[in-house]
Image (cartoon, rainbow, N blue to C red):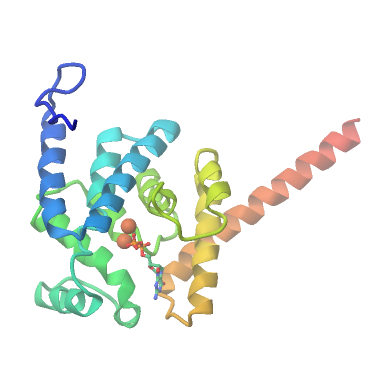
Amino acid sequence: MVSKITREGTDGIMTEAFNLILSYRKNLEMKLDPMRYEHSLSVSYSCMSLAMCHGCDLEKAELAGLLHDCGKRYSDDIILKKCKKHGILFSPEEEEAPAVLHANYGAWLAKHKYGVSDPEILSAILYHTTGKPEMTLLEKIVYIADYIEPRRNKADNLPSIRALAYKDLDETMYRILKGTLEYLDRKSGKIDPITLKAFEYYQELHRKQALKQVMSSDEEESDA
Ligand code: DGI
Ligand code: FE
Ligand code: FE
């Protein structure tokens, strides 16, 4: 038997933030198709587990994860029209890669329809598809949770990426962006320059880290 969610948390405390989460869930369940809604819940929980591991604010992670795909309620064509109608900024390159536009529209909806004013959450929604160089902890958590959430089944290397996500967020960004660019190359998809810049940034971190490891193992050998 499925019991109703009580109006109190398990420890008896019903926070305002949790109330808001429950009302957003109800709204998203009506607006999104069932699998997209399920994915949104799954990303929200994955964000919280990554936030626990990496020391990020749990409430922000939960909310950003839940709303990250709130813009994905229409086809790419309609999303483009909505962006134009509401004066939502997007680049000509984004117009050519319309799969990324639900993030722009989603950040706008989060601000104007869901009343989210926290710039960190809005930015995590805006960059959840492309990534960008020098991402904040919350931005990386949402980007990565979107890829590794338990119901996702997009890539063969998911098990190793999932494990890595709980150890090293920057290296995980590098691995996911590399896979995304290879995927876009295979299907001849237009690459948004910001996706490429994000990849180059995390590739550089990956190289520096690899070099550091070689140097320290050289030092260990010469000490022996
Ligand atoms: O909305 P989701 O399906 O949960 O995931 P998402 O927001 O990461 O969108 C995934 C799609 O976005 C995936 O098919 C790859 C695509 N994508 C990411 N960067 C680019 C891109 N597509 C194009 N055309 N260009 C990009 O730079
Ligand atoms: Fe998305
Ligand atoms: Fe998503």
Specify whether 155 is left or right of 213: left
Q: Quadrant of ligand 2?
A: bottom left
Nearest the camera: 40 or 109? 40
Corner quadrant of residue 9: top left
Does residue 34 appear left or right of residue 197 in this picture?
A: left
> Residue drawn 77% across and 44% down?
215
Quarter holding the N terminus is top left
Q: Residue furthest top?
A: 11
Q: Is 211 left, or right, of 82 in this rendering? A: right
Task: Quarter of the image for the C terminus: give it.
Answer: top right
Q: Residue at x 41, y 46 (%)?
A: 150
- Which residue ends up furthest to the front in the rendered image? 1
Q: Position of residue 166 (x, y in %)?
A: 50, 38
Classify 184 as above or below 41: below
The quarter holding residue 204 reads: bottom right
- Position of residue 101 relative to residue 139, above or below, is below
Position of residue 175 relative to residue 26, above or below, is below
Q: Nearer the viewer, residue 206 or 189?
A: 189
Residue 96: where, in percent of width, then height? Answer: 33, 83
Determine if residue 120 is in view.
Answer: no
Q: Residue at x 51, y 71 (%)?
A: 183
Task: Tell me: 180 left or right of 70.
Answer: right
Q: How many numbered marks have been drawn onto this rendered protein structure?
A: 0
Q: Position of residue 158 (x, y in %)?
A: 52, 52
Q: Is residue 2 visible?
A: yes
